[in-house]
Amino acid sequence: MKIGIINVTGYAGIELARILYRHPEAEIVSITGRSQAGEELAKALPHLARTNLPIEPEITQSVDIVFSALPQVASAEACIPYIRGGVKVIDISADFRLKDSLEYLEWYGVKHPAPDLLESSVYGLPELNRTLIKDSQVIANPGCYPTAALLGLAPLVSLGLIEEQIIIDCKSGVSGAGRGLSMSTHFSEVNENVMAYSIAGHRHLPEINQELRKLKDNFEPKTIFQPHLIPMTRGIHDTIYASFNDKMKLSPEQASTEVIQIFRDHYAADDFVHIMDAPPQTKQTWGNNDCLIYPTVDKRTGKVVVFSVLDNLVKGAAGQAVQNMNIMFGLPETMGLEQLAIYP
């Protein structure tokens, strides 16, 4: 497959190029960048020197698929000509995730440049939408927080086991904010500090609720979603709290054993979701495409608690994009994504 990457110089684009370099069926033939157009990739990003190509203002080669790693709004505008021209597109931004253009306007503050394309785009979380992804042209790659949250909630919601009130307490490494400079991601501000942000509402909340609604008829989530920035480069750690409904009538001890089996059965055929025997650590997913989940039940309150972790730049962005590409082209889902985590 011949591949074009729009905005290879952002963190998601950088990681995408690194992963695709080792993919046996992929050939990156054209890359773009905004501020570094005209430079050689080897000079702009020396660790990607083996994938050396000129960074251009536009995709100049014929391609089978385009990945966009631009920020929202700019990404949709760049993708639209390829979509209209029949090229397969995977958008790593948020531009094609929300089906409701008015909701997009509410959360992103601008009108969507192609609202007619929202309905035909597919939310690219393979563990939930594999069949739809296979026959799609436009994939909306999920956000990093929603990936961890949805995978941590899907077995419980789809079986109708929990109440609609859900709390998702999240921590993210600094790379989730992107490569642009800002005071909030300055080393001196982040180091030895933990900070809650987007208290009035984070842009990932509507996509979480949208996809939860699809899992169970008449399920209307009342989600509290609170992200925090912590002093590490990579990683997403979601701790999810929910209450069982009347369908789960076991004691907390019995329910804890049962819920682990429910998760193992639900993800038995999924190569990148692993149900753990203890709370997972973000370091266990550094550089790989795994989501590690540990569900348990609090013995004092009977509430279910789910820990879900992943690498925000791999399963939360570029790795999941490649997983989607594999499905779209009928390739083994794990192709090019078999790497283990880096430790320590």
Image (cartoon, helix red, strand yellow):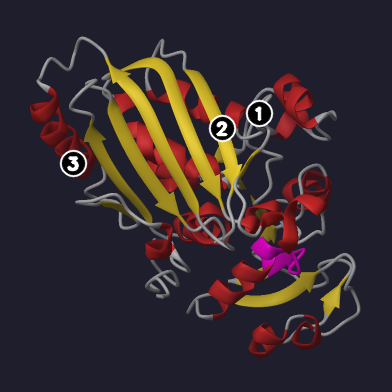
Between the residue at mark 2 and the residue at mark 3, the CA separation in whole angstroms equals: 29 Å
Which residue position holds label 2? 226
Q: Badge 3: how crowded within 10 Å, few (<14), some, or many (20+)?
A: few
Residue at disc 3, secondary structure:
helix
Please tell me which residue lies in front, 182 or 341.
182
Q: Amino acid at mark 3?
A: Asp
Q: Is residue 143 left or right of residue 156?
A: right
Q: Position of residue 256 (x, y in %)?
A: 16, 33
Above or below residue 331? Residue 168 is above
Q: Is residue 256 left or right of residue 209?
A: left
Toward which corner of the image does residue 245 lie, by quadrant?
Answer: top left
| Residue at left offset 48%, top offset 69% | 287
| Residue 324 seen in this snapshot | yes
Residue 265, numbered label: 3
Between the residue at mark 1 and the residue at mark 2, the CA separation in whole angstroms equals: 7 Å
| Residue at left offset 37%, top offset 19% | 216
| Residue 331 seen in this snapshot | no
